[in-house]
């Protein structure tokens, strides 16, 4: 029976492009991302773990994948989309070929997740928040994040590391929009993230902005492109590695959010 269940689980994972397997001597880490995350990944995240061992002497096996994939779900990885796949369509079957937490958590010790920079294109609130709305508004983001927090906490055997939302370059936002995005990031750090659970933050936004409202031009691909540049990615990739190791070593609530 156990072998049959494992075979079914392995088949579901293969169907959605996941190759990780539970057990063994290695700690399994999955990094879910789109283009901003890929730039940082290629800055040296996997290389950081080449010689790393946990205090118990275990190696770290870290994998990455686009989430959600462009087809069939669509190239959107904002609060609504994580909520849509993991909360609204939770369960043991993939949703639009994307793995739910019921599929992922038995296979990974730590799941790293993030949004891409359009998350910071935050429109004004309407006064009618809707958890099932894909509109980028603080009122909706908060409801979606609260539901995601409850969902992630229901899998205490897996830790989660959430990036604070990437910023936009000044040329691609407005002062009002940037202020709303900054307010969301502050809420995530100061209210949503709580000590003592299985959810942790990497404060990527602070590294990008040095505490300001926009992605600094020296960290951006160009003055009109909000992707991080290769030099910045090479600098922060080891900081992501350090933040991951802090969580794996049980120091996630004590270590700095940036990994510095």
Image (tube, rainbow, N blue to C red):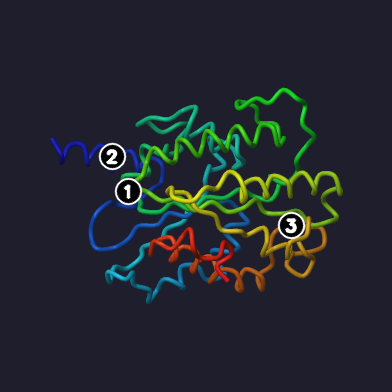
Check disc 1: other Cα within 10 Å, few if <14, some if 14-19, many if 20+.
many
Residue 65 appears in the rendering? no
The answer to whether residue 190 is left or right of residue 94 is: right
The percent coordinates of residue 100 (x first, y second) are 42, 37
SS of the residue at dot 2?
helix
Q: Nearer the viewer, residue 128 or 135?
A: 128
Q: Earlier in the sequence, mark 2 or mark 3?
A: 2
- For marks 2 and 1 on the same chain, the one whose residue lies earlier in the sequence: 2
Mark 3 to mark 1: distance in Å? Answer: 33 Å
Instruction: Return the mark for residue 9.
Output: 2
Who is closer to the viewer here, 243 or 116?
243
Return the residue at label 3: 226
Q: In this view, does 80 lie to the left or right of 161?
A: right
In terms of depth relative to the viewer, which is nearer, 115 or 148?
148
Labelled pair 2, 1 in contact (Cβ < 8 Å): yes
Q: How many marks?
A: 3
Looking at this rendering, what residue extends furthest in the bottom direction?
51
């Amino acid at each position: 029976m156990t072998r049959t269940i494992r075979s079914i689980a392995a088949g579901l994972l293969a169907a959605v492009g996941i190759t990780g397997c539970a057990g063994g001597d290695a700690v399994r880490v999955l990094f879910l991302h789109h283009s901003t995350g890929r730039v940082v990944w290629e800055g040296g995240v996997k290389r950081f773990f080449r010689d790393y061992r946990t205090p118990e002497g275990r190696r770290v096996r870290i994998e990455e994948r686009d989430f959600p994939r462009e087809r069939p779900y669509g190239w959107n990885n904002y609060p609504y989309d994580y909520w849509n796949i993991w909360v609204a369509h939770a369960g043991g079957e993939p949703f639009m070929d994307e793995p739910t937490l019921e599929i992922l958590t038995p296979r990974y010790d730590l799941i790293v997740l993030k949004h891409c920079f359009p998350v910071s294109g935050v429109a004004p609130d309407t006064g009618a928040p809707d958890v099932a709305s894909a509109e980028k508004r603080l009122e909706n983001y908060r409801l979606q994040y609260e539901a995601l927090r409850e969902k992630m906490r229901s899998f205490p055997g897996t830790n989660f590391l959430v990036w604070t939302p990437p910023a936009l370059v000044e040329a691609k936002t407005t002062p009002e929009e940037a202020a709303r995005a900054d307010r969301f990031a502050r809420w995530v750090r100061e209210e949503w993230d709580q000590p003592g659970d299985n959810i942790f933050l990497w404060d990527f936004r602070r590294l990008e902005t040095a505490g300001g409202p926009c992605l600094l031009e020296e960290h951006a691909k160009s003055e009109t492109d909000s992707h991080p540049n290769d030099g910045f990615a090479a600098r922060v990739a080891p900081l992501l590695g350090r933040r991951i190791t802090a969580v794996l070593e049980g120091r996630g609530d004590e270590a700095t959010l940036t990994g510095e």
